Amino acid sequence: MTRIDFAFGAANRLRMACQVMRRHYQHGRRVVVYSRQPKVLERFDMLLWSFEPTAFVPHTLVDDPLAINSPVVLTSVLPCNLPETPEWKQAWLLNLDTGCPPNAADFPRILEIVSEHPDDKAFARQRWSSYKAAGFSLHAHDVSGKPH
């Protein structure tokens, strides 16, 4: 069953997504980054090059010939043509879209990062409800750093 982790309270959604991608890259995990909005993927792509002066996460678009060797691939279409390797068959999904990914059950784990922006929180609540109705295993994590 697909596990879905929501990280709530991010100061900046895309910057936190970059930090998460760096950790997964350092641990050797393959990740598909999804958004139907090409502008979001373009911003994320640029941020992956520059989010920290000494950090870099190798990444490419899913249809690039180098995708088979890249630990992170970006796509605006799911399902997508992932490389046919054991590592990619166990790839996680980072959802940067406002809605749920169309083939969520194809991934063992989905990561959702939610900022404090009201629109972002509203879309996250809708995704949470949709995932819950579909019977996914949901887990919430407070990443705001604020005391409870």
Image (cartoon, rainbow, N blue to C red):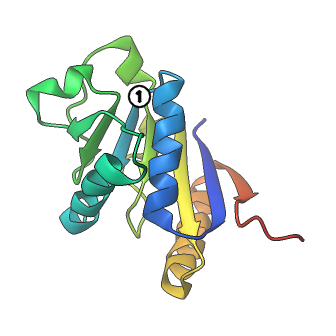
Name of the residue lying farthest toward the right? 148
- At 33% from the left and 56% from the top, the residue drawn is 47
Q: How many marks?
A: 1
Q: Nearer the viewer, residue 47 or 132?
A: 47
Q: Quadrant of the N terminus?
A: top right
Q: Up-down: is 82 above or below 14?
A: above
Mark 1 secondary-structure assignment = loop
Q: Nearer the viewer, residue 32 or 9?
A: 9
- At 45% from the left and 30% from the top, the residue drawn is 25
x, y percentage for residue 131?
57, 58
x, y percentage for residue 23?
54, 35
- At 27% from the left and 26% from the top, the residue drawn is 70
Q: Nearer the viewer, residue 57 or 89?
A: 57
Mark 1 Cα shell of 10 Å, populated few (<14), some (14-19), many (≥20): many
| Residue 38 left/right relative to 101 | left
The residue indicated by pointer 1 is: 30
Of the residues shown, which amino acid type is indicated by label 1? Arg
